[in-house]
Amino acid sequence: MAAANSGDDIRDALSWYNSRFQPKAMDNSKAGADTLRHLFVLLFGLGMRESSGRYCEGRDRSARNISADSAEAGLFQMSWDAHTADAEILRLFGEYHASQDDGLLAIFREGVPAHQYDLESYGSGDGRAFQDLCNQSRCSRLNARPSDCAPFGVTGGRSIGTRP
């Protein structure tokens, strides 16, 4: 995650946003803690853009992405098909799916009520389980954890890129 800017504007969100980072003296040319902090700045903005900062956001209801692989969920509105871009997403999914950690749920829930339409999952299998894991509104029924979404978002941002 803390790797230097790859220069690949197609797959690496840090590269794509480089023109925005540079004027702010946010240099990502070297791997390390600064690049990791800048990646989390990007992730924070992505969460606000994709879900208005709501940890429990369901899929974009104006989109027709209702298959298990394409339905987006959670703070960063990721879908299961992201796992094909980076094996790390599949590894993280397996680890987090088996975990009993609560993912700081009480903190993420403060002042953020879930809406009924946020409770919907689509399809079956790993794609549906990924939606359940990312969309924390289902915590009462499943072992979903808000803090698990950040590594998915960061890994996706470095391997899938971003859409303007």
Image (cartoon, helix red, strand yellow):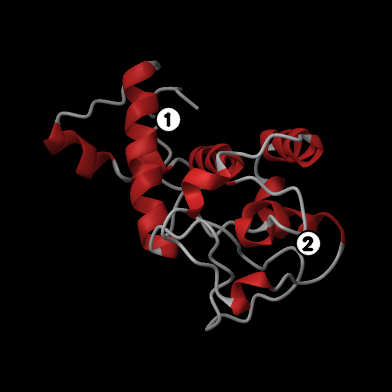
Residue marked by disc 2: 128
Who is closer to the viewer here, 73 or 84?
73
Mark yes or no: residue 5 visible.
yes
Tell me if 100 is positioned left or right of 17 in this view. Answer: right
Vertically, is 139 above or below 151? Answer: below
Residue 148, by quadrant, is top right
Q: Closer to the camera: disc 1 or disc 2?
A: 2
Helix, strand or loop status at disc 1: loop
As drawn, the label of residue 6 is 1
* Label 2, residues with CA under 10 Å away: few <14, some 14-19, many ≥20: many
Q: Label 1 to label 2, Cα distance in Å?
A: 32 Å
Disc 1 residue crowd, few under 14, some 14–19, many 20+, Cα 10 Å: some
Q: x%, y% of residue 33?
A: 37, 17
**Residue 36 higher or lower than 120, as above or below:** above
Task: Identify whether 59 is placed above or below 22.
Answer: below
Picture quadrant of residue 52: bottom left
Give the quadrant of the C terminus: bottom left
Residue at far right of view = 125
Going by the numbered disc 2, the residue's amino acid type is Arg
Q: Measuring 35% from the left and 25% from the top, which residue is drawn there?
A: 35
Mark 1–mark 2 CB contact (< 8 Å):
no
- The structure residue drawn at horizontal position 45% and vertical position 60%, both measured from the top left corner, is 54
Residue 31 image position (x, y, % from top left): 40, 17
State which quadrant residue 117 falls in: bottom right
Residue 128, position in %: x, y? 78, 62
- Between 95 and 81, the residue placed more toward the observer is 95
Amino acid at the residue labelled 1: Ser
Q: Is residue 30 visible?
A: no
Q: Earlier in the sequence, mark 1 or mark 2?
A: 1
Q: Residue sitting at 70 percent across and 73 percent down?
A: 120
* Horizontal arrangement in the rendering, residue 58 relative to residue 125 (left or right): left
